[in-house]
Image: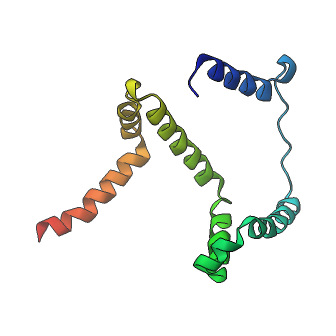
Amino acid sequence: MTSPEQVADSVKRFRDTFWPNGILAETIPCRDKAIRMRTRIAGKPKLFVIMPDELKHIIGAETTRKGILRGFEMFQHNQLNRRMVYVFLEGFLETLFPQYKFRELFNKLHSRSKQMQKSKQKLQSTQAPSLQK
């Protein structure tokens, strides 16, 4: 995966996706709410069909159905999807290139985040009363 040929091929595919024929690709037009809802309705049965029957027999049909629906609903949030891609990308880089110490870099970057600072403050404030006991 990290051979020069594979990396060059990946970069070329990325380039061709965003700049076909050397011209920046047009933005995809936003779909209206009715089309998005029709797509959601059409997508749910397709998820049920791809689930193997063996799995349904092992964990139960109702449990499988609920799990599929929860997974489907989970992927309907753009902000969470974007965050998940970032987390996967960070993990990919840390695993693929351990010599570059990406974990330390990401910890430094995240420590500067206002959201991380708020989370640390909340964590400290919830832990403080338990430490006083």
- The reply, left or right, for residue 75 in relation to residue 132 is right
User: Number of marks in the image?
Assistant: 0
The residue closer to the viewer here, 48 or 131, is: 48
Q: In the image, what residue occupies the spot 60% across and 17% down?
A: 4
Q: Is residue 84 above or below residue 113?
A: below
The residue closer to the viewer here, 116 or 93, is: 93
User: In the orientation shown, which residue stands out farthest toward the front?
Assistant: 54
| Residue 55, x across and y down, in percent | 64, 72
Q: Is residue 111 above or below residue 132?
A: above
Q: In the image, what residue occupies the spot 62% across and 81% down?
A: 60
| Residue 76, x across and y down, in percent | 68, 60
Q: In the image, what residue occupies the spot 65% across and 18% down?
A: 5
| Residue 85, x across and y down, in percent | 58, 44
- The reply, left or right, for residue 20 in relation to residue 114 is right
The residue closer to the viewer here, 95 or 123, is: 95
The colour scheme applied to this rendered structure is rainbow
- The reply, left or right, for residue 64 in relation to residue 109 is right
Q: Is residue 84 above or below residue 94?
A: below
Q: In the image, what residue occupies the spot 37% across and 28% down?
A: 101
